[in-house]
Image: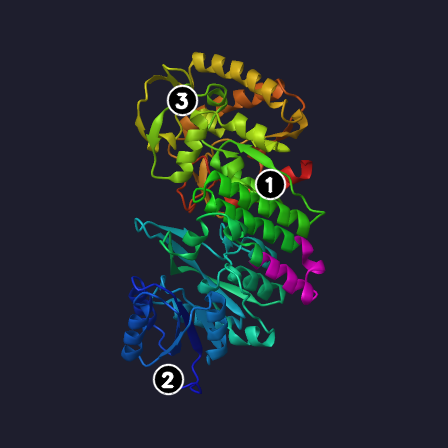
Amino acid sequence: MKQNDRVPISIIVPVYNVCEWIDQCLQSIVDQTFQDYEIILINDGSTDQSDVKCQQWKERDNRIRYISKKNEGLYRTWNLGVREAVGKYLCFVDSDDWLDPQYVEKLYEKAVETDADMVECDFWRVNNNNGKKTYRPCYGRMEKEYTIREHMIYGESTLWKFMSKKSIWIDNNIIVPNCMGASHAVYVLLLLLGAKIVNVHEPLYFYRRLRKGSILDIQGKGAGEQGRMGLQELDALIEETKKRGLFEPNKEIIEMTVKYRLSDLLAAQFTRKTEKDFAIQFNNYYNFVGDRFPHGRNDRYFILGGYNLNRILSYLPEVQNPYYRFNFSSIISIMHPAEDMVAFGHENEYRKNMIERDIYSSFWSVIKEEKPKFLFLDFLEERFDLIKLKKGGMITKSDAFEGTITQDLDGVVMERDSEECQVQWEKDCLAFLERIVQFMPAENIILVENYLSETQGDVYSQRPYDDLETIRKTNNLLKTYYKYFKDNCSKIKRIEAYKSSFYYTDEKYEYGAVPSHLNEVVNKEIASAIADIL
C-alpha cells in the first residue's frame, strides 16, 4: 500500500520480541469482517524472530506496511505510527493481543454514526498461564454510562481498546511521552481537551496478561527506577495540563485520577516485589502525591475485613496500599497467632499472602511499623469457622483458606455459630479494642457495617440468592458482633453501609456473583458517606 492511498482506518501494531504471539494477533486483524484498512507494523528492534514473522506477513497481505527500526521504546513507535497513518481513524493493537472478528466493523460503525472522537469497547483479560478470561467493561458500571469525569478517573486508560480520529492527535499536537504507561497520560489528556467518547458495550478485544517479558512483568522486578513505576506518566500528564492551562480548572479530577492510577499500580505489583522493594515503591508514590497535591488527602490507612471493603475504599481520594490490607482474617485469629510454623501453598499469591498474615497475626507488627492514621473494618470475614491449632493459635477458615494446600495442620474446628465461639469472640474483641487504641485514637476507627447481600442483579432487576435463609442467619450473627463492638467502643465512627440504595451483588462481577461482594455503584455511594465523616 502506498503512502498516498486513502483508507478509512489505520491499525498501528508495535512489535517487540513477540515472536510467539504475533501470528495470532495479525491473523485476527486480517480476518476482520470490515476489510478496508491499512496495517502499520512497526518492529522496534526485536532480538527474537519477530522481524522474520513481520516480513512473512508483509508478503502475505498487501495492506501491511512494515517498518523496522532500532529499539527506541514503545512511545516512539506509537508516535511514528500516528505520523505514518493515512486513515481518518486510528487503532492501536498490542502485538501479543488479538481481536474479535467484528472489532473494527463495530467500532467504525459507531464512530461514523455518532461522529465521536473516540470509540472504545469492553475487553477480555486473558490469563496467559491458564487461559482463563475475565470480562472488563469500559463504558461504565452496572449498565450506567460513565460521565467524562468518571472516564478519566476509573476508565481503562489504554490506547489499545479504542478507535480515535487522527485529527484529534494532529490538531491538538498530541505526542506520546517518553515513559512506560504513557497511554494513561494520553487518554486522560484527550478527554480533558474535550474529545467526545462513546462506547460499544461488547468485549471485542482480548488482552493477554501475565506474559513473561511483558512491560508489567519487567517492571515488577526490583526497585530503583522501577520503584517509580507510573510516576513519569503522571508527571507528564500534570506538566502537559499545566502547559495547556488545563491543570487548575481540573485539579480535583486530576488528583483523583493520579491517586486511583497509583492504587491500581500498587495492587498489580504487590505480589510481584519483595517487601522491601514494594515499600520503596509505595513511599515514592506517597511522597509524589504529597508534593504534587499538598492540600489534598494523603493519609495512611489500614483495612481489616472483606475484600469488597477494598473496593469501597478505592473511591476515597487517597492512595490505597495493599500492604495495609488484612483480608480473610478475623478478630479471634488476630488475637491468637500460630505459635509454630504452618506450611501451606496457594495458587493465588495475594490470597497466600493474606492467609499467612492471618496465621501469624501480622496485623500488630505492621501497624506498629507503619503507624496508620485510620483503621477501616467490617466483619464479613467473621462469618467463618476457625481452626484451633493444638500447638497454639487460631486460623480463620475463610473461603480463601479453603484453597490452600496445607501441611502439618493439626487442630480442631470451632464452629462460628457455637456458644464457644461467641464467648471467645467477645473476649478477644475487648482485648483487640484495648490494644488498638495504643496505636490510634478510637475516633479514627471507622466501622463499616456491611452484611452479605441477599440479592444479585443489575440496575433494572434483582433476584434473591437461592440460599437466602442461610444468608439471613449469618447476617443475624454479624449484627450481634457489630452491636457488641459499638457498645464497647462508643467513640468509633460508624457507617451503616447496608442502608445504602442498590445494596446488592453485581451479577456480572468478574470474580463471581457471591453475597460478600456488592457492586460499584453502591461501593462508590458508601465511600462518599465515609468521606463525609472523615
Image side of residue 392 versus residue 140, left or right: left
Q: Is residue 236 magenta?
A: yes
Distance in Å between CA atoms under marks 1 and 3: 29 Å
Name the kind of residue labelled 3 in the image: Asp
Q: Where residue 7 sits in the image (x, y, percent)?
A: 42, 81
Q: What residue did someone put label 3 on?
A: 385
Marker disc for residue 1: 2
Q: What residue did someone put label 1 on?
A: 527
Number of residues whose C-alpha sits closer than 10 Å to that of mark 1, classed few (under 14), some (14–19) or many (20 or more): many
Q: Secondary structure at mark 1?
A: helix
Q: Is residue 67 magenta?
A: no
Q: Where residue 9 sits in the image (x, y, percent)?
A: 43, 76
Answer whether residue 414 is visible to the viewer in this image.
Answer: no
Which label lies toward us, 1 or 2?
Answer: 2
Name the kind of residue labelled 2 in the image: Met
Q: Which of the 4 image quarters holds residue 146?
A: bottom right
Q: Which of the 4 image quarters holds residue 472?
A: top left
